[in-house]
Amino acid sequence: MVTPENRDEHAGWKLHAAERALQLVESGMAVGLGSGSTATLWIKLLGERVREGRLKIRAIASSADSERLGRTYGIPFVSFEECRTLDLTVDGADEIAPDLALIKGGGGKLLREKIVASASKRFVIVADASKQVEKLGRFPLPVEVIPMAVPLVMDPLRELGFTPTLRVNRDGSRYVTDEGNLILDCSGLFLENPDAIAAKLDSMVGVVEHGLFLGMADLALIAGEEQVIERTI
């Protein structure tokens, strides 16, 4: 049985999903580079093709880490001023529901990930089978908050049924996002109606973004022991 505890044992599965996603990339595309362990494998495979001259693409990354990795392979990067629309974005997820509703943001990059996904004609998720759930909520939902608003956001999150915890680094210091915000990891609530929760979060003053990606994914490539399963809505 695949569980969250043993998901790191499935690097081979993740590689299969990344290899399948590589087949979706064509020369001339503008591509969004996601974040996370499986997306990182895909960036490396993509970068090798670019370095070998087998692919010519332009890219926008959802995190500084992904951009740094891409640049080591010679992937050329542009901004949204130069490229308003991406042909394809490949990214990971922390949870994938049957309707391709997602929880993302375990790596702290949710704001840029959602921006990049929203600008993409095709948003593809790569993951191993441990990320599949029947109902979102086993993984704590990240909520990115402006620092001064953290105390004000805590109470309404609790009223929704969450237990919010301020994310910290290993040394105990506050985790700060690329945009200078803080993250509240919200646990203790399985999401019966993710759309309603998303609407509540969107209305909270001080909340910059949240990790619910609803109605955004077009395809999920989910690698298991024997094969990569393609899931669509």
Image (cartoon, rainbow, N blue to C red):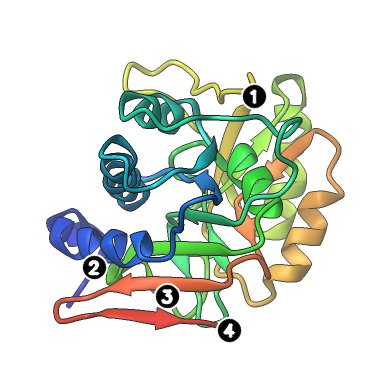
The quarter of the picture where residue 152 lies is: top right
Q: Residue type at mark 3: give it.
A: Val
Q: Secondary structure at mark 3?
A: loop
Residue designated by label 1? 181
Can residue 138 be seen in this snapshot?
no
Instruction: Please report whichever mark, 3 or 2, sits nearer to the chain's N-terminal start.
Output: 2
The residue sitting at 58% across, 44% down in the picture is 113
Residue corresponding to mark 2? 3
Mark 3 / mark 1, whichever is N-terminal = 3
Query: Mark 2 or mark 4: which comes first in sequence?
Result: 2
Indicate which disc, 3 or 4, sits on the residue closer to the N terminus. Answer: 3
In the image, what residue occupies the spot 74% across and 36% down? 208
Foreground of the two, 115 or 162:
115
x then y, percent, for residue 184: 58, 38
Tell me which amino acid carries mark 4.
Answer: Ile
Residue 233, which numbered label? 4
Q: Nearer the viewer, residue 178 or 200?
A: 178
Picture residue at 17% right of the left edge, 78% below the top: 1
Question: Which residue is nearer to you in this view: 89 or 96?
Answer: 89
* Amino acid at circle 2: Thr
> What amino acid is found at the position of numbered circle 1 in the picture?
Asn
Quadrant the C terminus occupies: bottom right
Q: Which quadrant holds residue 5?
A: bottom left
Residue density around tag 2, few if under 14, some if 14–19, many if 20 or more, within 10 Å: few
Distance of mark 3 from mark 2, alpha carbons? 10 Å
Give yes or no for contact between labels 2 and 4 (Cβ–Cβ under 8 Å).
no
From the image, tell me which residue sits under label 3: 133
Q: Residues within 10 Å of mark 1 (few under 14, many from 20)?
A: some
